[in-house]
Amino acid sequence: MDFDTPGGPVTHTAPVVLAADGAYSAVRGRLQFLPGFDFSQEYLDYGYKELTIPARDGGFALDPGALHIWPRGKAMMIALPNPDRSFTCTLFWPKSGPGSFAELDTVERFEEFFAANYADARALMPDLAGDYAHNPIGHLVTMRARPWHVRGTAGAVVGLLGDAAHAIVPFYGQGANCGFEDCVELDRCLEETGDDFPRALAMYGARRKEHADTIAELALENFVEMRDKVASRSFLLRKRVEHGLERLLPGRYASRYELVSFSTVPYAEIQRRISRQRGAVAAGALGALAAVALAARALRRR
């Protein structure tokens, strides 16, 4: 491993390298030159820019107990509370086309568009023009790699963790959590193998890859849900029914969002559980309809 330091270049050799150096991992970049190492990255045609709603009279300007979403079909803004009682707002807009970052390329154009489409938020953002002018446009990317461990020279082994192995878009808020889960699983594997790093890293990758791929897809799906569906009456009705079932059947029925955000159920198992729940609900609904139909027929016969 070669490092640039304030004192000059430093080279260090180690039998084990655990690379948790982020989505643009230097270690993974080197591994990509090795035969048999697969890597892909997929960018959304969307960018993001952060804005601020400051505290108002020392308090929150919006309800701090809610996730605030401004769905606009092909674009959206969200707001999340901060400890200083401000809110960080994030615009997720197309990179090109109508209503995009490319089209709204001056502060004047942006302010006119924002006031027309986010009027209630605009009234809470005195520094809007400055935020838009000075905050950069970020990019949204999903990265996948395989395998997560590679044998090097002289028996050395390299393992990838967190975003270095599986960078995802932020729409489920699970990127950091997924990396922490990698650490927990690797720790389990080291315990099971008696700290045999080559075996433990192979076991860790085999166990975690399915779950990392699942949350990557769920995060992309949740973007569409937040951007498009939360303004739909049928979608909101379905969510009310879902919350009603959670209250009616505690511990037996849980929404996908509840399981992803507030449980330690592995991501791929969540998908399987949701499929089973939906099947059971559908069967129950059909059974109830059949019972009603039979009761109505019996009444007619009387």
Image (cartoon, rainbow, N blue to C red):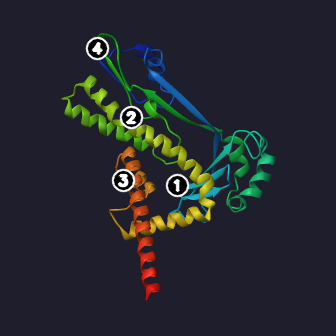
- Judge by depth and name the residue closer to the eye, 115 or 165: 165
Query: For mark 1, what is the residue?
Result: 82
Q: Residue at x 73, y 43 (%)?
A: 100
**Residue labelled with disc 4:** 155
Classed neighbour count for the residue bearing mark 1: other residues with Cα under 10 Å, few (<14), some (14–19), many (≥20)? few
Residue 58 visible in the picture: no
Return the mark for residue 225.
none
Q: Amino acid at mark 4?
A: Gly
Badge nearest the viewer, 2 or 4: 2
> On the rendered structure, is 150 left or right of 68?
left
According to the image, label 2 marks what residue? 209
Residue type at the position of mark 3 = Ser
Which quadrant of the figure contains the C terminus?
bottom left
* Between marks 1 and 2 in the image, the one whose residue lies nearer the viewer: 2
Residue that lies at the very extreme toward the front in this rendered image: 301
Mark 4, Cα crowd under 10 Å, few <14 / some 14-19 / many 20+, is few
- Which of disc 4 and disc 2 is earlier in sequence? 4
Residue in the image at 26% along x and 28% along y? 200
Q: Nearer the viewer, residue 233 or 1?
A: 233
Relative to 135, 218 lies left or right: left
Instruction: Return the disc, 3 or 1, that comes first in the chain's sequence.
Output: 1
Could you give the CA–CA distance between mark 1 and mark 4, rounded to whole angstroms? Answer: 47 Å
- Looking at the rendered structure, the secondary structure element under dot 4 is helix
Q: Amino acid at mark 2?
A: Lys
Numbered disc in front, either 3 or 1:
3
Q: Secondary structure at mark 2?
A: helix
Tell me where residue 257 appears, x and y as whole percent.
45, 55
- Reading the image, the residue beneath label 3 is 263
Q: Earlier in the sequence, mark 3 or mark 2?
A: 2
Element assignment for label 3: loop
Q: Which of pointers 1 and 2 lies earlier in the amino acid sequence? A: 1
